[in-house]
Amino acid sequence: MKQIKAKIAQKRNSQIKIDTDFIRLDSALKLANLVQSGGHAKAVIQDGEVIVNGEVCEMRGKKLHIGDRFEYGLNVVEVTGA
């Protein structure tokens, strides 16, 4: 009997550094190079494809602070201070 081996995609962890009190979610996606434009960011957020701190977030203006985490696709990004 032939065995089938499946590769399980692993999430990639990264960080973005900010030197302000917060960064908007759409800007954070662009800073992390996960989207190509603000319009792309708006679309993936409104489609419910982005998770912030464990919950689906559909607010593109959501303020992210140091310590927050967001996910898009297989990417997990933590917001850190400069």
Image (cartoon, helix red, strand yellow):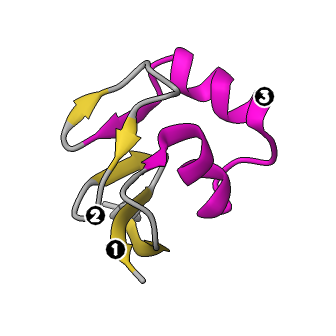
Q: Position of residue 72 (x, y in %)?
A: 47, 45
Foreground mark, 2 or 3, reads 2
Graded by Cα atoms within 10 Å as few (under 14), some (14 to 19) or many (20 or more), the crowding at tag 3 reads few
Gap in angstroms between the C-alphas marked 2 and 3: 25 Å
Dot 3 or dot 1: first in sequence order is: 3
- For the N terminus, which image quadrant? bottom left
Disc 2 secondary structure class = loop
Residue 39's disc number: 3
State which region is magenta. Answer: 23-52
Q: Amino acid at mark 3?
A: Gly
Residue 66's disc number: 2
Please give left or right for residue 68 compared with residue 4 in the image. Answer: left
Q: Amino acid at mark 2?
A: Ile
Gap in angstroms between the C-alphas marked 3 and 1: 25 Å
Nearest to the observer: residue 60 or residue 10 = 60
The stretch drawn in magenta includes residue 46: yes
- What is the quadrant of residue 47 in the picture? top right
Residue at numbered disc 1: 80
